[in-house]
Image (cartoon, grey):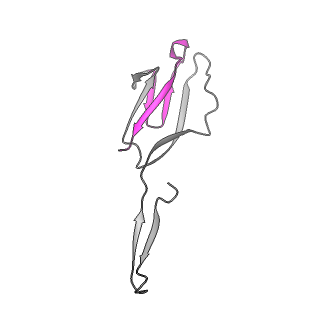
Amino acid sequence: RQQSGTTLVCKNILLATSSKKAILNVAYPPSYTPSPSVQSTTPTEGDTFMYNYIISADPQPDSYTWRRNGQIISNSSKITVTVNSITISSVNRSDSGVYTIFSSNV
């Protein structure tokens, strides 16, 4: 990852006047880090809960699926999901669970 975008120079050691340049782009799968703005994962009933992530991937994810307790969830009047966030309005006890995002950039 750290070498992605690096310019490589290939030289012919026998002919010092000849060289070629190439760009090295390293592909790697998505990884998610909680955004520094995330304060708490324990909202109070009635609150709007938002959880944002910083995505590290090359290329960026082209598909994603959110799950709650293993079951696929999608956008509704209560829940909004994107490739890097989830928002649940008017949270209550029935919203408790393990929320997971699965994404792919292949």
20 relative position to 36: left or right: left
Residue closer to the observer: 21 or 77? 21
Residue occupying image coordinates x 57% and y 17%:
46
Q: Note whether 24 is above or below 45 in the view shown.
A: below
Q: Note whether 56 is above or below 49 in the view shown.
A: below
Residue occupying image coordinates x 52% and y 57%:
2
Q: Is residue 10 something that shows in the picture?
A: yes
Residue occupying image coordinates x 51% and y 12%:
94
Image position, residue 37 (x, y; %): 61, 37
Residue closer to the observer: 87 or 30? 30
Extreme-top residue of the structure:
94
Which quarter of the picture shows residue 15?
Answer: bottom left
> Is 105 part of what is drawn in magenta?
yes
Residue range highlighted in magenta: 78-106
30 relative position to 106: left or right: right
Image position, residue 65 (x, y; %): 39, 31
> Is 93 part of what is drawn in magenta?
yes
Count up the numbered dots: 0
Residue closer to the observer: 1 or 55? 1
Residue closer to the observer: 68 or 39? 68
Extreme-front residue of the structure:
14
22 relative position to 90: left or right: left
> Which image quadrant: the C terminus?
top left
Q: Note whether 99 is above or below 54 in the view shown.
A: above
Image position, residue 102 (x, y; %): 43, 33
Residue occupying image coordinates x 61% and y 22%:
43
Q: Is residue 76 something that shows in the picture?
A: no
Image position, residue 10 (x, y; %): 42, 75
Which quarter of the picture shows residue 8?
Answer: bottom left
